[in-house]
Image (tube, helix red, strand yellow):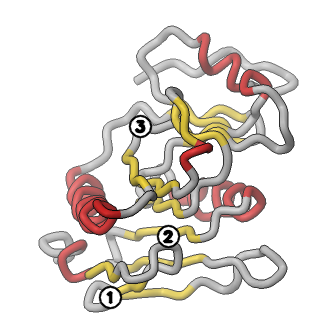
């Protein structure tokens, strides 16, 4: 496991992040550092693989692209330089439909769609910190996947830009993506072999 960088009173930036030399994987939320080094459990990887395959196969004829972690998403608060950005995350799956947001380092700006798969160590961050960050950054569709329960919560913005009450789906359901009209994700295959 990687060691946390030494505390920095004013918080960390993407410039700091780029200079860390150990083998750890990190995320920054409002300048606070989160260790992402532990490998996910096998159920997480099975769910990730199936979701990504369904999305990727749908996008073959689309200008949108899907990416899987590790993939840096930099979320500037205004137009600050990359090195000053205080929010850098590595969502499990990211869909970006604006090629102008993509560069050799990943994505700068809000992706259209983000999916996070919850583990016991990330539940609070995914459900509270990241939810607020994605809402404030303008992510149009945010899915939180709960492997232990076979549930996916879908967060969509209302007219005011704030996420409305999530819509919950169970392992027997299908979800139609708002970001990618025509894509229906079959949760039966997503959770197949996962639930007891």
Residue shown at 24% from the left, 63% from the top: 57
Which numbered disc, 2 or 3, marks the residue that appears first in the sequence?
A: 3
Placement of 77 over or under 182, stated as above or below: above
Residue shown at 30% from the left, 57% from the top: 48
Specify the label residue 142 is tagged with: none
Placement of 124 over or under 168, stated as above or below: above
Which numbered disc, 1 or 3, marks the residue that appears first in the sequence?
A: 3
Q: Position of residue 97 (x, y in %)?
A: 52, 58
Mark 1, residues whose alpha carbon is within 10 Å: few (<14), some, or many (≥20)?
some
Specify the label residue 70 is tagged with: 3
Q: Which residue is mark 2?
A: 143
Q: Which residue is mark 1?
A: 174
137 displayed left or right of 184: right
Quadrant for residue 39, please give it: top left
Q: Position of residue 40 (x, y in %)?
A: 31, 45
Q: Secondary structure at mark 3?
A: loop
Mark 3, residues whose alpha carbon is within 10 Å: few (<14), some, or many (≥20)?
some
Q: Secondary structure at mark 2?
A: strand
Mark 1 vs mark 2, CA separation in Å: 13 Å
Which numbered disc, 1 or 2, marks the residue that appears first in the sequence?
A: 2
Residue shown at 40% from the left, 70% from the top: 146
Circle 1/circle 2 CB separation < 8 Å: no
């Amino acid at each position: 496991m990687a060691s946390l960088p030494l505390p920095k009173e004013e918080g960390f930036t993407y410039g700091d992040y780029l200079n860390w030399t150990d083998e750890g994987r990190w995320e920054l939320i409002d300048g606070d550092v989160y260790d992402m080094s532990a490998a996910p459990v096998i159920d997480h990887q099975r769910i990730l693989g199936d979701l990504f395959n369904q999305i990727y196969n749908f996008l073959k004829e689309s200008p949108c692209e899907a990416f899987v972690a590790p993939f840096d998403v930099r979320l500037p608060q205004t137009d600050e330089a990359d090195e000053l950005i205080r929010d850098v995350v590595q969502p499990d799956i990211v869909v970006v439909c604006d090629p102008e947001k993509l560069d050799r380092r990943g994505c700068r700006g809000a992706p259209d769609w983000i999916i996070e798969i919850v583990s016991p160590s990330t539940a609070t961050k995914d459900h509270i910190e990241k939810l607020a960050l994605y809402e404030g950054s303008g992510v149009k569709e945010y899915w939180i996947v709960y492997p232990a329960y076979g549930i996916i919560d879908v967060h969509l913005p209302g007219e005011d830009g704030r996420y409305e009450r999530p819509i919950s789906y169970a392992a027997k359901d299908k979800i139609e993506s708002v970001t990618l009209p025509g894509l229906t994700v079959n949760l039966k295959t997503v959770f197949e072999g996962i639930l007891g």
